[in-house]
């Protein structure tokens, strides 16, 4: 009888822990702006907002990758929640406020720079080859007389 009670207690404990973790995950998704400052982006101009949005998107992607990597190991879901979830929630809240400021300021994306095309015109002249150095020694002809006399 005691082993049956132990199994029931263990199952109830696991069910309780599972419901707590799922409740935390649901709550964290709905309160993502609670970890961010709503006035942070009030004085940003469009150029600053664009850079901030890119940085936030990169950080969010990095955290998602870290959480996915952590979840592949044993107990990884718990590690991902403990180590990365709060940062991820804060980044999502900041992203939401940055997006609101972006829309409020009526900002537009800066077009990506186009690669410079070659200018039409005269062709580029190849560089001149350097003169071959004259080596002195037994293999080179000499202009001095062989008998040792001077001109």
Image (spheres, helix red, strand yellow):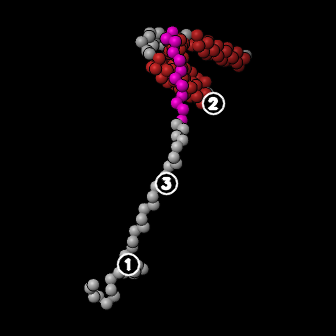
Q: Quadrant of the C terminus?
A: bottom left
Q: Which residues are magenta?
A: 104-115
Instruction: Please identify the residue farthest to the left as the structure is shown.
Output: 150
Q: How many residues crowd around disc 2 within 10 Å: few (fewer than 14), some, or many (20 or more)?
A: few
**3 or 1: tag closer to the N-terminus:** 3
Picture coordinates of residue 107 (x, y %)? Answer: 51, 15
Inter-mark Cα distance, 3 to 2: 57 Å
Q: Secondary structure at mark 3?
A: loop
- Side of 48 where 147 appears, left or right: left
- Closer to us: mark 3 or mark 1? 3
Whole-angstrom CA distance, mark 1 to mark 2, is 72 Å
Location of mark 3 (residue): 126
The residue that disc 2 covers is: 72
- Disc number for residue 137: 1
Verify CB contact (< 8 Å) between mark 3 and mark 1: no
Any magenta on residue 113?
A: yes
- Foreground label between 3 and 2: 3
Q: Residue furthest bottom?
A: 147
Instruction: Check if residue 121 falls in the magenta segment.
Output: no
Residue at 40% over, 78% down: 140
Q: Tell me the SS state at disc 1.
A: loop
Foreground of the two, 44 or 61: 44
How many marks the image carries: the answer is: 3
Q: Which residue is located at x 49 percent, y 24 percent?
A: 55
Point out residue 9 in the picture as x, y percentages from the top left corner.
67, 15
Q: Residues within 10 Å of mark 1 (few under 14, many from 20)?
A: few
Residue 70 against residue 108 in the figure, above or below? below
């Amino acid at each position: 009888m005691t082993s049956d009670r132990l199994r029931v207690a263990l199952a109830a404990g696991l069910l309780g822990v599972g419901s707590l973790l799922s409740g935390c995950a649901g709550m964290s998704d709905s309160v993502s702006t609670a970890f961010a400052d709503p006035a942070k982006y009030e004085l940003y101009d469009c150029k600053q907002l664009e850079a901030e949005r890119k940085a936030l998107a990169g950080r969010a992607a990095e955290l998602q990758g870290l959480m996915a990597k952590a979840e592949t190991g044993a107990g990884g879901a718990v590690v991902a929640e403990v180590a990365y979830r709060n940062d991820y929630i804060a980044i999502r809240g900041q992203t939401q406020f940055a997006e609101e400021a972006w829309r409020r300021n009526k900002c537009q994306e800066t077009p990506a720079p186009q690669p410079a095309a070659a200018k039409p015109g005269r062709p580029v002249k190849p560089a001149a080859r350097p003169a071959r150095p004259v080596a002195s020694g037994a293999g080179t002809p000499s202009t001095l007389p062989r008998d040792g006399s001077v001109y």
